[in-house]
Image (cartoon, rainbow, N blue to C red):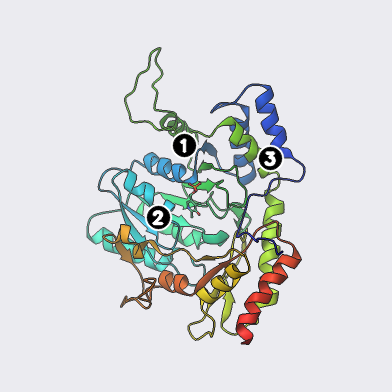
Amino acid sequence: MKEHIFLASPHMSEEGYERDYIKEAFDTNWIAPLGKNVTEFEREMTEKLGAKAAVALSAGTAAIHMALKSVGIRQGDYVFCQSLTFSATANPITYEGGIPVFIDSEEATWDMSPAALALAFEKYEKLGQMPRAVIVVHLYGLCAHIEEIAALCKRYGVPLIEDAAESLGTTYQGKYTGTFGDYGIISFNGNKIITTSGGGMLLFNTPDARERAKKVLFWATQAREPAKWYQHEEIGYNYRMSNIVAGIGRGQLKVLDARVEKKRYIYEYYREHLGDLPGLALMPLGEDTHSNCWLTAIQLADDCSVRPTDIMTALEEDDIESRPVWKPLHLQPVFADCDFVSETEELHVVDAENGADNSVAGTLFGRGVCMPSDTKMTDADLERVCGIVRGLFSV
Ligand SMILES: *Cc1c(COP(=O)(O)O)cnc(C)c1O
């Protein structure tokens, strides 16, 4: 019987670091939100990445929500957000009554197009409606053109939030993603490069990072005012990470570099064994970037004999997981009323079944597949996957 191959699954350290930290929490009876593991996890992460401050939270989604609170989002505010991403990037905008404006991707990075972002700024400046924030995503561990995007945000005086949920460990010119924007967010969900079963972190990079972190900590712990009784002057949230969960995180952080290395090995394996197939291309890793290659995604050219669904179906028949590329948020029914800014002039649907359009994000979605990229995969597993894909091309 063949073994199931995961897309990406939790991978605890062989050394058992995570268990040791959890055991310590048990032994000292710190089974609570707060405790040594939480504060140490925040400190270790800020040191590793070079952020100014960090707050550990219950999820990456909560971190995005808190970043938006921190920039002072109000009902009716616009927020520019990358369209090609998971819905969790944009959902928190609506929690606060904000209105997402989706921005198209560029082929070079698959992430937010600086040219489309510039168009959006020009358009909304004319309307007298500057956005409250910009959210850029480093999809699949690919690094966006972050310097160009940060420069545009600076020029318009708009704060930048980096959704680094998928790119923990990715560097651009030696600097970690999540530390370029005013804020960076990380996720430790079960399928991410390191996991705590569930959790997230908000990174702060502004000169007043410590004050901002303090305020987020306040909101994330029920907004309890410093008084001798329970005093509340703002709406609070129960978003704090538990000391147990943080223990897993501290252990996982020790193996982050090893996980990045394995993910990059998986990418290289696919490049060597599938890169020659006609009409198949791997995601572009980008100049000056050391990508964590969280998932290796591929693209099939329009005239390629094999379709993304052919690959996903063939793998599934052999008990192997793969996934479509995220369906862009501007094509999601739940965001149907939102504006979308793209360099593509005449937008139209090219696939009636899945709704893919001819924007860059829509095209990447329509032609893409995320290949199994589990760090526990052996060479034999990788060979099995590549064999199935190659088989589809030879018929
Ligand atoms: C996973 C993910 C999130 C959300 O993180 P959670 O910890 O699951 O809440 C946000 N953005 C992107 C791009 C993600 O992949």
Numbered tag placed on residue 251 in the rendering? 3
Helix, strand or loop at label 1? It is loop
From the top left corner, tell me how far across and down residue 189 is, in percent.
55, 47
Ligand 1 within 8 Å of the CB at mark 1: no
Instruction: Locate the N terminus and report the quarter of the image it occupies.
Output: bottom right
Numbered tag placed on residue 369 in the rendering? none
Query: Extreme left residue here?
Result: 127
Numbered tag placed on residue 153 in the rendering? 2
Label 3 and label 2: CA atoms lie apart by: 36 Å
Mark 2, Cα crowd under 10 Å, few <14 / some 14-19 / many 20+, is: some
From the top left corner, tell me how far across and down residue 171 is, in percent.
61, 56
Mark 3 and mark 2 lie on one chain; the one further toward the N terminus is 2
Ligand 1 within 8 Å of the CB at mark 3: no
Vertical order, 16 against 238 (above or below)? below
From the top left corner, tell me how far across and down residue 261 is, in percent.
71, 58
Frontmost of labels 3 and 1 is 3
Ligand 1 within 8 Å of the CB at mark 2: no
Q: Is residue 66 left or right of residue 293?
A: left
Image point (35%, 75%), residue name: 352
Helix, strand or loop at label 3? It is helix
Give, as a three-letter code, the residue at label 2.
Cys
Compare residues 253 and 181 and report the one nearer the observer.
253
Q: Check contact, mark 2 vs mark 1: CB within 8 A.
A: no
Is residue 158 shown to the viewer in this render? no
Instruction: Locate the C terminus and report the quarter of the image it occupies.
Output: bottom right
Mark 3 and mark 1 lie on one chain; the one further toward the N terminus is 1
Q: Check contact, mark 3 vs mark 1: CB within 8 A.
A: no
Q: Which residue is mark 1?
A: 208
